[in-house]
Amino acid sequence: MKRTQKLAYVLLTGFSVAMILGAWGFEFIGEMPPCKLCYYQRYPHWVAAGAGLLAIVTGLGLLAYLAAAGAAVSGIVGLYHTGVERKWWEGPSTCTSSDVSNMSADDLFNQIMSAPLVRCDEIPWELFGLSMANYNALLSLGAAALWVYAIKKLK
């Protein structure tokens, strides 16, 4: 593995670690607990960070592809979460609001009592009109593209 490729792997692995630490920062310091889709965006970064670290240590290109896939999956989930937040489509019934106009009082009460504390279709934080899911989608898909570039072009 060339030095430039190894450096790229280190930086991209660090990116996934930084994304996880940033999410924890929002959760524990910013007191913004994650919704179900937020958790689903974190898990692939764990895969990317672990695979990236192993790729650095072993030099196996297959592990670098796994790291790229982890970043890409997180970005894709971020795109899906973006659509849920922006009400472009409905998210999982366990973490989004639904039409209550045809519900009985008992059904509505049961839905309220079983609802999660954090909803997937609400935006708790924005910067420049973009939510955390938006930033994750953009940054993670960009990182996936950079992984592929590092694998293919920095040999």
Image (cartoon, rainbow, N blue to C red):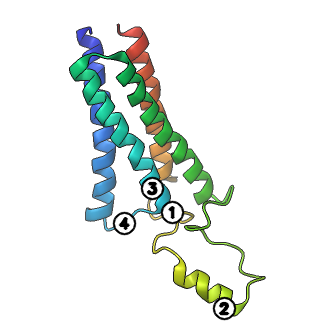
Q: CA distance from mark 3 to mark 1?
A: 11 Å
Residue 45 picture quarter: top left
Quadrant of the image containing the C terminus: top left
Q: Is residue 9 above or below residue 102?
A: above
Q: How many marks?
A: 4
Residue 46 has which mark? none
Left or right: 111 in relation to 12: right
Residue 92 or residue 60, whichever sits in front: 60
Q: Is residue 92 visible?
A: yes
Amino acid type at circle 4 is Met
Disc nearer the start of the sequence (4/2): 4
Q: Which residue is mark 1?
A: 123
Quadrant of the image containing the N terminus: top left
Residue 32 has which mark? 4
Left or right: 79 in relation to 132: right
Q: Is residue 21 above or below residue 138?
A: below
For mark 4, give the secondary structure: loop
Residue 111 in percent (x, y) is at 60, 81
For mark 3, give the secondary structure: helix
Q: CA distance from mark 4 to mark 1?
A: 11 Å
Amino acid type at circle 2 is Asp
Q: CA distance from mark 3 to mark 4?
A: 11 Å
Q: Residues within 10 Å of mark 2 (few under 14, many from 20)?
A: few
Residue 106 has which mark? 2
Residue 4 picture quarter: top left
Q: Residue most toward the bottom?
A: 105
Left or right: 155 in relation to 138: left
Left or right: 83 in relation to 50: right
Asked if disc 4 and disc 1 are in contact, CB closer than 8 Å, the reply is no
